[in-house]
Image (tube, rainbow, N blue to C red):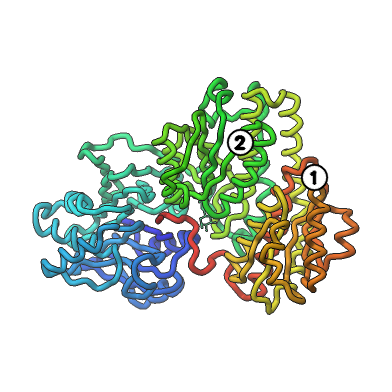
Amino acid sequence: MCGVVGYTGKRQAVDWLLDGLQTLEYRGYDSAGVQVVSPSGNLHGVKCAGRVAILRERAHTANLHGTCGIGHTRWATHGTPTDRNAHPHLDCTGRIAIVHNGIIENYQQLKRELMADGHEFRSDTDSEVVAHLVEEAWAGPARGDLAAAVRNACDRLEGSWALAVACADVPGELVVTRLGSPLVVASTDDGAYVASDVMPLSSVTSRVFQLDDRDIATLHADGSIDIVDRDGRLVSNPVAMEIDWDASAARLGGYSDFMAKEISEQPEAIERLLAGRLGKHGIELDELKLGKEELAALRHVVIIACGTSYHAGLTAKVAIERWAKIPVSVEYASEFIYDDDYLVPDHTLCVVITQSGETADTLAAARRMRGMGCDVFAITNVLGSTAAREADGTLYVQAGPEVAVASTKAYTAQMVASFLLALRLGFANGRLTRDEVEKHLHDLEQIPDLMREVLSRRWQDKQAARRFRHKGSSLFLGRNVSSATAFEGALKLKEISYLHAEAYPAGEMKHGPIALLEPGFPVVAVVPAGHVHDKTMSNIQECLARGASVIAVATDGDERVAKLCQEVLGVPNCPDDIIVPAVSVLHLQMLARYVARDRGYDVDKPRNLAKSVTVE
Ligand code: G6P
């Protein structure tokens, strides 16, 4: 979703702004722009629909000079993705520029009022009102004090925002603020920086500061930053955060795309997550921040998530119900928030799963659960993210930066993190003995090598991808825990190859989707060994009888599958069926990637999608 960058200091601003925007491309966007304060004290900039690479060319032609500026990647919400709707937006005088991430919910009313006062609007965005509100404050009560003008403007806003504001009358100064949308700042010898997340800042520092909601920070050219909180008090000790991965983790390092790199990083991510977990509580999960008695008293778990994280939640449900014998509901955050009749039993733990930690729906749902008196436990990949800051306890999945929009390594790490939670709960409530916990943990420790084996079979996925050529639709099937894998496989394919993919619990196929089948129709069936294998085989037969091409994800040595199905994506024997989803899904990630590449698409930056969905 939208990305914000800003810099003031000794260097030419445009260079870092463009590099920073390029680093933020992973969030998903459709247009971009930069604006700098020129040495002659004027604002000048460029903006355009399309990629940062186009912006870079235009910025080069425009020869933008200046050591203070702001930049933005826009993911359209209000107004189509066009040059005029791209940020930065200027006020009527052309001396104030703003970039904004979030949604100004009362923009229509504000726009009407501002237009009645003679302001001229040049875009269809909600964001532009901010430029005019700052203009009003600057011309009136806050003249000469940009931070006061920004505060004054924000007092009239409803919604969410991360804002960076430059003003040609105070060259060398940037004012930034946030409410509900993330923003981090960094102070260096070269100058002061701001960005929506730590990714662009990792090239200039390993230490960043997070702003709290309604903090206003003024960035100065000497690198100093003044932060004032919502009550106007100076924040003398802002919360510092160390970036604990080296900047190269977010570079391609020889891979053709980030998705390929991140798929291949999964074994190491799981090893990191599992390291040192066995201890006196069975599983060491201090991150949970709940004592043994509180854990033992839990009667219900509600898992809340969106997208791929929701699929991790479906697997988590199986693990928690099996190991801890606690009933689990898994809810889409966007549905849960507005379900006024939702009943939450006493002693419920809320678990939010979110790789970014910034998904607006998930955050709203977590706040609602806290409001209902539940403890909230976050499973996330991003250090210091809003979900982590607001939760009672947080388990970082430690997958490292995930740049490709379609989640891969964060997904499997979320699943394994939830297995740890299930073991911790099961041990705390006496459903699992220490020996059983040890055994299950030992099984989990097999996952990295099992994943390596699947990765070595990527040729199978490449070969199977040919079955999707010239097709307009596909079906993914699985039963029980494998239905979550089928859902995730279909989502991956849709996200990056733009091919329609329908996922169904295999037994439900006969109630509708079977009508789609025709000769050559691609069906992906997840059919590992286990108690539902034979039932799924019957569904595969039903597909084959209608001429479908079946691509089966099956356990090594499954002769029936090998004989019947057109393609087999082989999975080595796993010691427990619960860990199969974390291993078998790698095939479906690779399959989706090969299909997308076959169609000539950019697998890292699929159209219309955003990595971090900060609007409801
Ligand atoms: C977006 C991303 C998905 C992600 C979903 C939920 O749609 O493109 O990859 O699964 O948001 O994001 P979260 O950060 O909450 O896991």
Answer whether labels 1 and 2 touch (C-beta < 8 Å): no
Q: Considering the image in quadrants, where does the C terminus appear?
A: bottom left
- Tell me the amino acid under the disc marked 2: Pro
Query: Mark 1 packing: few (<14 Cα in 10 Å), some, or many (20+)?
Result: many
Any atom of ligand 1 within 8 Å of the CB at mark 2?
no
Comparing 355 with 433, the one in front is 433
Any atom of ligand 1 within 8 Å of the CB at mark 1?
no
Q: Is residue 470 above or below residue 98?
A: below
Determine the residue positioned at 48% across, 67% down: 608
Comparing 264 with 300, the one in front is 300
- Rendered image: mark on residue 574: 1
Q: Is residue 565 above or below residue 210?
A: below
Tell me the mark number nearer the camera, choosing from 1 and 2: 2
* Lateral position of residue 251 relative to residue 40, left or right: right
Mark 1 → mark 2, Cα distance in angstroms: 25 Å
Q: Considering the image in quadrants, where does the N terminus appear?
A: bottom left
Q: Is residue 385 above or below residue 294?
A: below
